[in-house]
Image (spheres, helix red, strand yellow):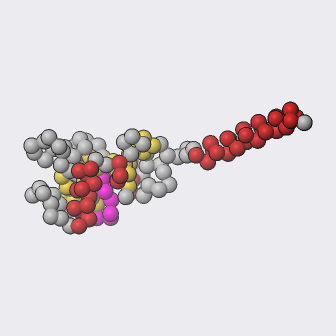
Amino acid sequence: MLLRSVPRLVAGLFVCLAVLLTGCSSADTKTDTSAGTRAATSASAPAWAAGMETVEEAGLPAEARRTLALIDRGGPFPYAKDGAVFGNFERELPRHERGYYREYTVRTPGERDRGARRIVTGQGGEVYYTDDHYKSFRAVLR
């Protein structure tokens, strides 16, 4: 009797495993958990982030999270250029009229000047992060 129920038990285990694995996979989101980044194909990414690499706020460097907190509070900012208009001359971000974007310095440990890291915000609530001085951006998911 026990030998006859083993195939049913094994088949049941395979069905449970298949259901579990299907529920854990996501075909429309690529995630790199070590960097907190993913492609913006996720349903949770806002429309303004479509087609861009994204990063969860928690995946940003601590200095970038501190800069975001300062932006949320309205300052005071440590650098005179923080809050200045970002011109988007590189055209890496969606095109908008001049003045739409503002930029903020993200301190880089060990750098004597402002370094290469910035957060750029848009008037529509967009937040972007660059760590290579505007060569590339990731949309910040908050």
Q: In the image, residue 100 lies at what x, y percent?
A: 25, 62
Which quadrant would the N terminus be assigned to in this image?
top right
Rendering quarter of residue 38? top left
Q: Residue at x 82, y 35 (%)?
A: 6
Q: In the image, residue 74 lies at what x, y percent?
A: 20, 67
Tell whether 75 sits left or right of 20.
left
Q: Residue at x 21, y 59 (%)?
A: 102
Which quadrant would the C terminus be assigned to in this image?
bottom left
Q: Nearer the viewer, residue 112 or 16?
A: 16
Tell whether 56 sits left or right of 72.
right
Rendering quarter of residue 10? top right
Q: How many marks?
A: 0
Start-end of magenta stretch: 123-128
> In the rendered image, is residue 28 in sight?
yes
Tell whether 131 sits left or right of 48.
left
**Relative to 108, residue 84 above or below:** below
Q: In the image, residue 95 lies at what x, y percent?
A: 30, 55
Q: Farthest residue in the top direction?
A: 3
Taking the magenta stretch, the answer to whether it contains residue 21 is no
Tell whether 5 sits left or right of 112.
right
Q: In the image, residue 89 lies at what x, y percent?
A: 21, 49
Q: Farthest residue in the right direction?
A: 1
> In the rendered image, is residue 92 in sight?
no
Task: Name the dominant secondary structure of the magenta segment.
Answer: loop
Q: Residue at x 23, y 50 (%)?
A: 63
Q: Residue at x 9, y 43 (%)?
A: 112
Q: Farthest residue in the bottom direction?
A: 74
